[in-house]
Amino acid sequence: MNLLKSLPQRLFSLRYMPVLTLLVFLLPVLAGLISSILPAFGYFPAIGNSDFSAIAWRELLAHPALPSAVVTTITTGFIATVVSLMLAATFVAAWHGSKTFLNARRILAPILAIPHSALAIGLAFLIAPSGWIVRAISPWATHWDRPPDVAIIHDPYGLSLILALAIKETPYFILMILAALDQSQSEQRLKLARTLGYKPVAAWMKAVQPNIYKQIRLPIFAVLAFSLSVVDISLILGPTTPPPLSVLVLRWFYDPDLSTRFLAAAGAILQFIIVIGAIGFWYAAEQGISRFARIWLTLGGREFFERPIRLVSKVAMRTLTGLFVGSLIVIVLWSVTRRWRFPDFLPSVWSFQSWNNNIYNLLGSSTTTLVVGLASSAIATVLVVACLENEKRRGKYAGSGALWLVYLPLMIPQISFLFGVQILSIKAQIDSSWISMIWTHLLFVLPYVFLSLSDPYRTQDDRYVKLALSLGASPAKAFWKVRLPMLLRPLLFAFAIGFAVSVAQYLPTLFAGGGRFSTLTTEAVNLSASGNRRVIAVYALLQSVLPLLIFAFAMWVPNYVYRNRRSLKGM
Amino acid sequence: MLSIRIGLAAIIVATIFSASVSQVTAHEHKNWNAVQSKAKGQTVYWNAWGGSERINNYISWVGKRLWDDAGITLKHVKVTDTGDVVSRVLAEKSASKNKDGSVDLVWINGENFASMKRNGLLFGPFTQILPNYSFVDVENKATTTVDFTIPVDGLEAPWGMAKFNFIYDSARVKQTPKSIAELLTWTEENFGRFTYPSPPDFLGSTFLKQALVELASDPSSLRSEVNTPDLLQETTKPLWAYLDNLHPNLWRKGSQFPASSAAQQQLLDDGEVDIHLSFNPGAASSLIKSGELAPTVRTFVFEKGTIGNTHFVAIPYNSSSKAAAMMVANFLMSPEAQARKQDPEFWGDDTVLSITKLSSADQKTFSQIKLGVATLSPQDLGPTLLEPHPSWMEYIEKEWLKRYGQ
């Protein structure tokens, strides 16, 4: 009797939240992956083929563009990841605790908040042969009255693609390193090493880096997978003949000749194999390096290229942030331009025509962006809080295995499972609906919300809640009145991160929205091929402003709420 | 309820096409009324290329007019590549979603049409019951009934005429080439000042077709489906020889090509190249008006003619608003909508209608349109060369990728 009565309550109880959360976001990823694998082996009843065969694979391996596409994919992906990681690590090592570091830290959140595609668009405006930098020095310094005939963007080596990735991923690594620092007694280790006479970089490399590496390994894998399979910025900056594999696969999916779908599916699976292989290779390389490093660690050298590293990392960080700020400014300029011919430094005719002409489309896609972003990050925040609260109450913490599961959607290339997700959502009759849009965004928002909220939540001092309980409050009351208000700042920050992630999604919006939903990002990326810089700039600018506003809001609210709570203010 | 509606639309169309010729007019009238009343309140998701601000604004205007006149809500779903739409309808068919499809109307022609027709993804025939179809110049504009050599069969409604042409800056270029052969000499004298978008961009592909048609020893063989490798290699040999000579003279020495035709437009404005390709004879004038190109740009074509075709709208088999989609297709062919489309102020795209079939008031509207400084008059636009069969293009795009795409 009693059992039956409490059944509904039990089903909704917190203990099922981790399982529910995993189901909500792992099931579509895995089912989608399987639905993509089937056509790769010839099973696609819709176009009259239900016999399994390896034809698509033979066709893929014989495709003329494949070898160089794969090479481009692998080189750009690895170089971007290695460069960002080295730069982040050396910058933190050389400048941690200094004024330079505090200044740089201020710009990290805005860089993270701005979608990749908006940055790529701005960067293209800035560094192209006809870009702002060349305009600034022409013709007086260069004698160019026409842009130089050199490939800077869409360059065959993918250098501009690597640069854009480095601008976005370096700050992410810095934040991940800082988060890892808080948990590993690094300050003490660093102090100890310094008192033993180690110079800053050497102290960091020998006493801290080995200790925190394990904690940033998963973020590294996520960045590696992302860099190997990114579509939107590859379209804007990547090589064109041939493009990286991800763009090639997308093109095959959209080929008017329907039999190319088999080739596309095989390509999507190859993309998956490349990412898995790359992660495996990284792991193996890591083991090899750590063996050599162990010898170096105990050699006792007190210096490690101190001056060069300090100088190079500072110049590199300044360059990256300078390019970031320049990209934003040039976007603003183009959005209010009517005529701006090469080599003029500023537009010759200014106008708001690009804003006026697009006002309805802008309102429409901004609304979609806002609704999907707010809903998916709100749902993600609720699910994550429920999981973390469940941990706290049961006193059990999820191990590193669970963390792998959270990272899974970030490590499987989007293109490898989104086509399958699309077929599944049509079967479930929720395709091109708000549900499928929000759900698909949730797959990518949830991991980031979890990652940014789990540490503050887990390390919160439990004595406040215990005190409330001992004063007679119910667990629910203690949660609502004590725990949540104290965690307001990280909660809102996680929410803002989730929103920024949602805004940036290109491929998921394309596949889940069935074309009926256009967000600022899909519009901006689609227009980026159109070459009309004025309109592209308008979308890229709005695309950047929305997440920045949500971040500003996330910072302002706690300050307002805590205005009478001095000890919570600076937390 | 929805299935009944779709059923009705199918019955109406079936009745019309089974009716004998003499009865068609009466039936048509009655059934068109039925379509009209059913269309009211429906929403049409029109998947159309969204890469041009002017065209997007034109489509918004169409939406406003249809809402005012017929109570139809028109939603422009902006696509980058129509192949995407084919892919979506296919995904729906694969999931047995045979009604309430996400696409109600699609802007289409050529390969995509051939593909949808072959796979049974289209609704119709429907164009013959649209009242405005009677104004279409099917007699003189052959491409309104044969799309890239594939018979249209009433499965898509003609919307506009396209003709391949070149846009150049007259301030920088004095002498323009008059044939594909002269273009080669021009690039030798103007090193690095010409390029074309990398296929499968439709203008890049059209440039290759133009070269193929001009250079092939037997252009008539291009009109039918090809499936013998010998004929393919033999006929395309002059094309590859030509490109091998041309590429070293191009922008970036032919090692890089613009990703899209629109990207090449920006290259022209930045002065990175001197010539841009277009499929729309009114484009240059419109682009001057909107400030996207310099006031000195002009248009030129080749003496012996350039490739021309027609672009259409079609209705997928699983649309839930077929009646309203037919209303939209009909309105697009109306003299009012076609005249506005021809005006470079709004778009500058050639009409599919026969001016002589129109009322005198409508004829006057068309004659008053100012074509713009950079637009060639119809007689200067030269002859129209027909598109090769899609099977040629498939081979050429693949071969191009193999030869130059890596």
Image (spheres, rainbow, N blue to C red):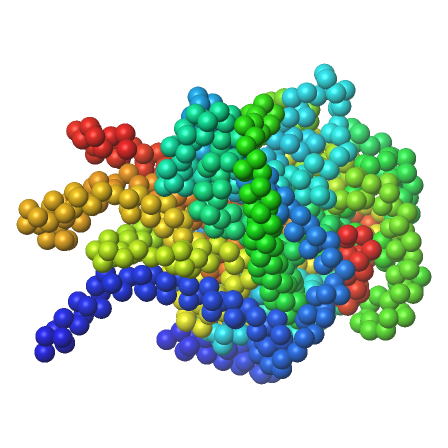
Please, which residue is most extreme toward the front here? A299
Where is residue A513? Give x, y as percent: 46, 58
Asked if residue A279 is positioned above or below residue A322 in the image, the reply reads below
Residue A253 figure quarter: bottom right
Q: Is residue B389 left or right of residue A130?
A: right
Please, which residue is most extreme toward the top here? A140
Q: Is residue A430 left or right of residue B55?
A: left
In the image, A111 versus A350, the foreground residue is A111
In the image, B54 versus A198, the foreground residue is A198
Please, which residue is most extreme toward the left here? A472
In the image, B195 versus B65, the foreground residue is B195
Residue B249 figure quarter: top right
The answer to whether residue A481 is seen in the rendering is yes
Asked if residue A134 is positioned above or below residue A244 in the image, the reply reads above
The answer to whether residue A560 is seen in the rendering is no
Query: Which residue corresponds to the image point at 66% horizontal and 24% vertical from the top-left?
Result: A135
Q: How many marks?
A: 0
Asked if residue B103 is positioned above or below residue A232 in the image, the reply reads below
Query: Which residue corresponds to the image point at 36% horizontal and 50% vertical from the top-left?
Result: A450
Q: Is residue B53 left or right of residue A11?
A: right
Where is residue B31? Give x, y as percent: 49, 74
Where is residue A195? Give x, y as percent: 43, 25
Asked if residue A458 is positioned above or below residue A8 in the image, the reply reads above
Query: Which residue corresponds to the image point at 68% horizontal and 55% vertical from the top-left?
Result: A70
In the image, A394 versus B129, the foreground residue is A394
Query: Which residue corresponds to the image point at 68% horizontal and 70% vertical from the top-left?
Result: A57
Q: Quadrant of the N terminus of chain B?
A: bottom left
Where is residue A209? Give x, y as percent: 49, 39
